[in-house]
Amino acid sequence: MTYPLYGIWDGKRYDYRRKAPAEPVTVVAGLEALMPDNPTRAFIADRGFLVFDGGANLAQVFLQHMTRAAQESCGRCTPCRVGTQRLRDLLHVFAYDEAGTEVLDEMEALALQVTETSLCGMGQTCAKALWQALREFRDQFRPLTVAQCAQTPGHFSYTTAPCIEVCPSKVDVPKYIDGVKGGKFDYALGVVLEKYSMAATCGRVCVRFCEDACRRKAVDGPVGIRMLKRYAADVALSGGKALEIPLPDVRRDERVAVIGAGPAGITCAYKLLLDGFQVDLFDAQKSAGGMASVGIPSYRLPKDVLKAETETLIRHLGGRFFFDKALGRDFTLDELWAQGYRAIFLGYGASQGTLLGVKNEDPSLAGYVSGVDFLLKVHKFVEYGLPYDVTGDVVVVGGGNVAMDCVRSAKRMGARSVHLVYRRTVEDMPAERDEVIACGQEGIHFHCLSNPSSLVIENGRVVGVELLTMRQTELDARGRRGVEPVPGTEHVMPCDLVVAAIGQQVDRAVLRPEDGIQLDKWHCITVNPDTLETTRRGVFAGGDCVLGPLTLVNALDHGDRAAASIREYLLTGDVVIKPEARMQQLLAANKLLLDEPVAVPPSPRERAHVPELPAETRVRHFKEVDGCLSKAAAYEEAKRCLRCYRVYSLSTARPLAHAE
Ligand SMILES: Cc1cc2nc3c(=O)[nH]c(=O)nc-3n(C[C@H](O)[C@H](O)[C@H](O)COP(=O)(O)OP(=O)(O)OC[C@H]3O[C@@H](n4cnc5c(N)ncnc54)[C@H](O)[C@@H]3O)c2cc1C
Ligand code: SF4
Ligand code: SF4
């Protein structure tokens, strides 16, 4: 039966030292057996502490925790800078030098002072559990015995914040915001570059999971995390400068093949090149960037920005590109092995359009195109001047970001009128709110609660689309409304082009059964979610071809993690799950960080506004709509960050392998 022996969590005291509970007690699910074959002795967090092993000595456990806290203190305010160091030193003296119990009195007073008077989340939370433990379980602080000194229990501390934890790439957001605030823009950019190279791209188009989780959101709006990332990256790339990333000092002989030079493949290659491996990238297109290049229109993401942090950077680091080379069409996995590659990363995305499933639908019809194919044609028109005529009336079907890109691009291509058809309400649209608003400003006609039932064909081309009016159904058990067609409401909307933008799929022609890679029912590649290994040894995969069409930052994260796995596989022959990854899973499964309100609200400061081109001029071209913050605005925005750092410390029975 599992239960904590004693501890305090969210203000509640647990004490089963004398008598076990009648039933299991779970405070943080999965904590007792977080590390395989290495039981948890104690856990310390901002919300309290829990002890599972009567042999754990609180002086030792908190010493390790405060050692990390003292390292993490930025030193800007005295209570935290001096207080965390003093607490660490007092714990050390008490544990190892047999100091008297008056040291415990001093620690209790100091831990409270650090908690109550520090400036940011780090100082306000790192000593709180120590204060609680000293008040409620002081008898568990003991000088270490000779036997305890000889033992080597495991210890692992992990520092994070809500915005970091919710970001798939786990970028240290408060750290780079600190860099912007301090005018150290290279430092700020360097924090992002530790994870991936596409900082300016991400600073423009990321879907901003971090801002959704930002604790300032409930006070006066989330910190403009994405705009600050863009600011730091744009400063570094201003005037067409190249990213200054030092070449690795080791050169390893192992060669890795990366299939697909999209965000996942580029990130994997970037990290492996920094580790000194030889990397070749194969892509079916003629340029790097994947959907960020041929999907996302240049009015949201200028292609010179993308190129600087993909193709140019990878070449600078020694990577080689083989464009117009498609796996499954031009070569096979076996041929890559035969050429001497020691590991392969598959990052070929999800590039096939999805059919609407309506009558008369035929992808070869004139006047009919999928969303991704439409955007590819627009891309070739804008970047290479290849002819593409979109001057008539355009109907785009869908309510996601791809549909928004299609309608806004059609407008810029000179369409007479652009109509967005969506089967649910505007509130239900999965597209980003900013995109929906921008469409309204740019004169896109919305037809919500409308669904196509048939294409109208004349002389072999589409001349209209038959629509059915939809209505919302009653709330279901989960509190959601469905939609259903209203009988007899068929009507035809004449048009010259129908764009089906209701989703993408993975290309089924890339892998064959003899490649030995397991696929799921959607033809996504099956991987070990922790290591990104496929079912074929030495082959790893990530991004949209694993997850289905998702987001840029999910692909960046997969590229980063796959590179770490490939590195380990090539150097040791094996891939293990690191304590850090297990801790992240624990925090996510228990939502330890995400629902926490701001205890002492800061004085309100309005969120910065990104300058943008006026709607009436921007629809005439593909120039970037959103501008960059000014230096002063970036500084003011950076000051809004509350630095919600938290330190989590785990003590285990035996030493932990791979703990940093
Ligand atoms: C129109 C559009 C707009 C989007 N907007 C946003 C946004 O604003 N924010 C956001 O976060 N996400 C957005 N996304 C999603 C995001 O772009 C993707 O999730 C991301 O690009 C996935 O990266 P990836 O590397 O896995 O795949 P991809 O970007 O698809 O890259 C895969 C690469 O593999 C290549 N390839 C394909 N088949 C083969 C083959 N057989 N052999 C060799 N190479 C091959 C392709 O040419 C491509 O270069 C958007 C997607 C689209 C389509
Ligand atoms: S980390 Fe926060 S609490 Fe600690 S010194 Fe810096 S500002 Fe103060
Ligand atoms: S206030 Fe700063 S540290 Fe806190 S969640 Fe927002 S961006 Fe992250």
Image (cartoon, rainbow, N blue to C red):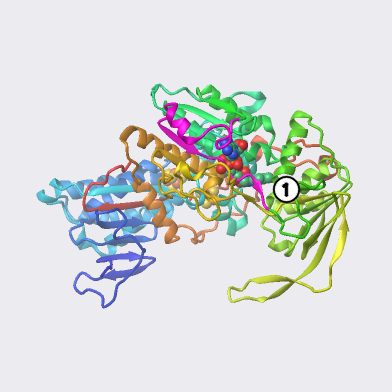
Read off the magenta span. 325-354
Task: Name the quarter where the C terminus is drawn.
Answer: top left
Q: Position of residue 293 (x, y in %)?
A: 66, 36
Task: Write the residue at 46% across / 49% down.
Answer: 518
SS under mark 1: strand
Identify which residue, 50 or 527, lies in the foreground: 527
> Where, quadrant-wise, is the N terminus in this rendering?
bottom left
Judge left or right: residue 369 versus residue 574: right
Give the residue type that dot 1 points to: Ser
Q: Residue at x 34, y 58 (%)?
A: 129
Can residue 331 be found in the magenta stretch?
A: yes
Residue 243, image x and y in percent?
56, 26
Q: Magenta span has 338?
A: yes
**Left or right: 474 in relation to 60:** right
Q: Quadrant of ligand 1?
A: top right
Residue plotted at (55% across, 37% down):
328
Q: Left of 505 or right of it: where is 617?
A: right
Q: In the image, residue 461 lies at what x, y percent?
A: 85, 49
Can residue 76 be spotted in the picture?
A: no
